[in-house]
Amino acid sequence: MREVALDPARCPVCGVRNECGLVEGRGDCWCGRVEVAADVLEALSTSGLGGVACLCRACLSGEVPSPCVRMCEVDAKGEACVACSRTLDEIRRWSRGSAGERAAILLDLRRRQAADAEAEVEHAPTVQGVAGRGR
Ligand SMILES: [Zn+2]
């Protein structure tokens, strides 16, 4: 499995700034004082991305934000949304999913995006799914 480079200052699930006190040099973090959604942590540890960066407040409390940017458009292959990169199956699972399932979907998404970003560098002209951006 490929390593995904994570920014320790950003939530590994949704990518917003996690305001981690340790990263900001304060010696302690707000995350020691909040209620934690166990299934989100579980998803994080199964993904292999745990321990690298702190979750943001929303994800840690189980309010995993949807990546939907309301520009829903299915890609040329009819498999995934061009705007948020979730597959149709993931979008379906999202609406009924628990916080843990949502976190798992986002973690999967980040892994794929990281792999895509690398593929784009290696063979730039053949990448699919670029069309439709920047409308
Ligand atoms: Zn988050």
Image (spheres, rainbow, N blue to C red):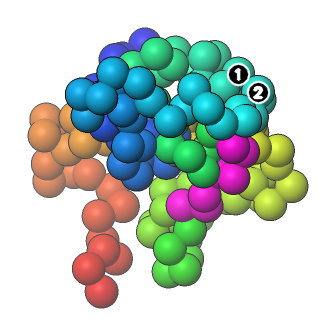
Circle 2 sits in a helix, a strand or a loop, which is it? helix
Labelled disc at residue 38: 2
Q: Position of residue 110 (x, y in %)?
A: 44, 40
In the drawing, does residue 62 fall left or right of residue 115? right
In the drawing, does residue 51 fall left or right of residue 122? right
Looking at the image, is mark 1 or mark 2 nearer the viewer? 2
Residue stretch rendered in magenta on the structure = 61-67
Residue 77 appears in the rendering: no
Instruction: Give me the residue at 13% from left, 35% from top.
Output: 122
| Quadrant of the image containing the N terminus | top left
Identify residue type, mark 1.
Glu
Task: Say which residue label 1 marks.
Answer: 42
Q: Position of residue 72 (x, y in %)?
A: 55, 77
Labelled disc at residue 83: none
Q: From the viewer's side, name the closer residue of 111 and 5.
A: 5
Q: Quadrant of residue 47?
A: top right
Q: Residue furthest right?
A: 96
In the drawing, does residue 111 fall left or right of residue 64? left
Q: Position of residue 100 (x, y in %)?
A: 74, 36
Q: From the viewer's side, name the closer residue of 10 and 127.
A: 10
Instruction: Give me the residue at 54% from left, 61% from top.
Output: 67
Judge whether 114 appears above or below 102 on screen.
Answer: above
Q: Position of residue 26 (x, y in %)?
A: 30, 29
Q: From the viewer's side, name the closer residue of 1 and 131.
A: 1
Dominant secondary structure of the residues highlighted in magenta in the image: loop
Q: Residues within 10 Å of mark 2 (few under 14, many from 20)?
A: some
